[in-house]
Structures are given as structure tokens and as C-alpha cells.
Image (cartoon, grey):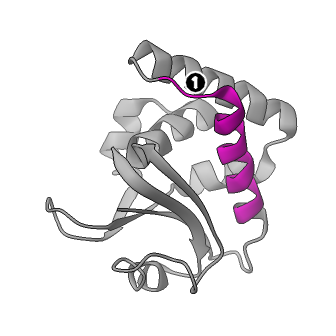
Amino acid sequence: MSIIVRFFVAPSHAAAAAVVDGGPDGAFESSAYGNFDAEEALVEWDSLFTGRGLDELVAADEPEFVAGPEGGEGPVVFAASRALQAALAAADRIRLLEVSRRWVRQRAADGESFDPTIATGILSDLVELVRGADGPDHRLYCWMA
């Protein structure tokens, strides 16, 4: 479980990795959340938006580890898959509501309670970040501490 989660868009893995110690604040626009496993959420959102199975995502090493202590304690940065990023960029309000409801049900099946309004808000914020990217090479990243 991550205590602090910040999603942000950066022009490269190197730029995203540069903020691993202190987070993206001051370097990139970000959306902040807390108290959920963001790495697991990225996998689940990818699966829900793209239809790719969890096994396929794990085999593709999605989300991609960018920076942080290997297997140790400390902040980490992950890159969302390009497929998830494209799906977020293309999502309309109805699709966001559908995916957030499915994600809330999935979390509930695993014993976690997530407010549907908050879930939709998170996905809506990600859509805004992705759509606001300055260039085609910019990626969606997640910093967790």
C-alpha cells in the first residue's frame, strides 16, 4: 500500500527518474492521492481499459519500473503502458464511469472499499494529465512513496 501517490506526465524515463527522491512537485504537474496500491491499480486499469489480461501485462512488465530501490524501501517511479495512456486519452465520461465502477467492484471483491466518486475522480485526473501532455513522447508516470 502506497502512502503517497502522485501521477504525472514527463518527456522521458530519465526526466521521470530524476524526481524519484523528492517526487514530481515543482518539476511536473501532478495529481496526488494516498492509501492505495497504485502499481496494482495501473495493472487493473490497463486490463479494464484495454482488455489485456493480467498475465499478459505481467509478461510485458507493465507498468514499467523506471526508478527506485530494487526490492527495497523508498520511493519508486513507474511508467503506465502506452496502451493505457492511449485509452485514457480517448476515454469519454461514460467510459470513465464504466471503468471506475468495474474497478471499485474488483477492489471490493478483494476486500477493499473504494468510493466510486473518488475512483472516477482519479481516472478523470489521469485523463486531464494525459491530454495535457506537451508532446507525443510524453508518458504517464506514477511516483509512490
Q: Position of residue 84 (x, y in %)?
A: 60, 49
> Dot 1 lies on which element?
helix
Give yes or no for residue 27 being in the magenta stretch: no
Q: Compared to 121, does 70 lie above or below? A: below
The quarter of the image holding the C terminus is bottom left
Q: Position of residue 66 (x, y in %)?
A: 35, 70
Total numbered labels: 1
- The residue labelled by disc 1 is 104
Residue 20: quadrant of the picture: bottom left
The quarter of the image holding the N terminus is top left
For the point 47% across and 57% down, which residue is it?
5
Most common SS among magenta residues: helix
Give yes or no for residue 121 being in the magenta stretch: yes
Q: Position of residue 91 (x, y in %)?
A: 79, 43
Residue 64: quadrant of the picture: bottom left
In the image: residue 38, left or right of residue 84: left
Q: Compared to 54, does 126 lie above or below? A: below
For the point 50% across and 56% down, which residue is it?
80
Classify 10 Å Cα crowding around label 1: few (below 14), some (14-19), many (20 and above): many
* Amino acid type of the residue that numbered disc 1 sits on in the rendered structure: Val
For the point 72% across and 73% down, which residue is it?
133
Q: Compared to 121, does 95 lie above or below? A: above
Residue 2 or residue 97, whichever sits in front: 2
Most extreme residue toward the right, as rendered? 93
Determine if residue 10 is in view.
yes
Q: What span is colored magenta in the figure?
A: 113-129
Residue 8: quadrant of the picture: bottom right
